[in-house]
Amino acid sequence: MGIDISGRHEEDGEYLMVAAAVHATVGTTRLHSVQGMGFAVSYHEPTLSATTGVVAEAVSDLPDPSAEPIVAERGEFYEEPEWMVEQYLEPDFKYVESIAERETVQAAHHAAYAARKLLL
């Protein structure tokens, strides 16, 4: 499951974070198909706790949220170590390691960005 968060910056004195989670089947180098997408919104300041909370909510929207590890770019969680982020999230968590995982996170990025633009 690839995740991405759009809008972790303050805009006009407010926050609007949108998390997207993409559950996909992947090969070694590419995304084969998207099985589902989950979204969540937060208006809280983007602390590690708030960020992981909105991600957990987006992941819980997926058909089988415990099936695969959650994968993200290092910057999503302020470059905190994997073990620290994993304390907040279920199932397992890791940072991107393969091309296919990067593709899944990229799909989540486009989904989160588009959803946030729709809400603005």
Image (cartoon, rainbow, N blue to C red):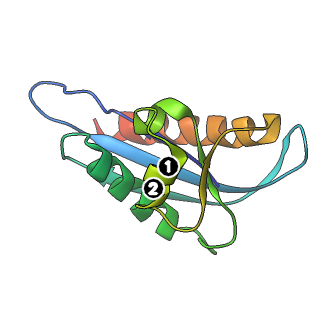
Residue 29: numbered disc? none
Figure disc tally: 2
Identified at 38% across, 53% down, the residue is: 52
Query: Which quadrant would the N terminus be assigned to in this image?
Result: bottom right
Going by the image, does 81 lie left or right of 10? right
Identified at 13% across, 34% down, the residue is: 14
What crowding class fits label 2: few (fewer than 14 Cα within 10 Å), some (14-19), or many (20 or more)? Answer: many
- What is the spatial separation of the Cα atoms under label 1 and label 2, in whole angstroms? 5 Å
Does 58 appear above or below 29?
below
Does 38 appear above or below 62?
above
Out of 86 and 106, give the one closest to the viewer.
Answer: 86
Query: As shown in the figure, which amino acid type bears the numbered disc 2?
Result: Phe
- The answer to whether the residues at label 1 and label 2 have Cβ atoms under 8 Å apart is yes
Query: Which quadrant would the C terminus be assigned to in this image?
Result: top left
Residue linked to disc 2: 39
Does 60 appear above or below 100?
below
Q: Name the element at disc 1.
A: strand
Q: Name the element at disc 2.
A: strand
Residue linked to disc 1: 20
| Direction right: furthest residue | 28
Return the disc, 1 or 2, that comes first in the chain's sequence. Answer: 1
* Residue 96 in picture, x, y percent from top left: 67, 39
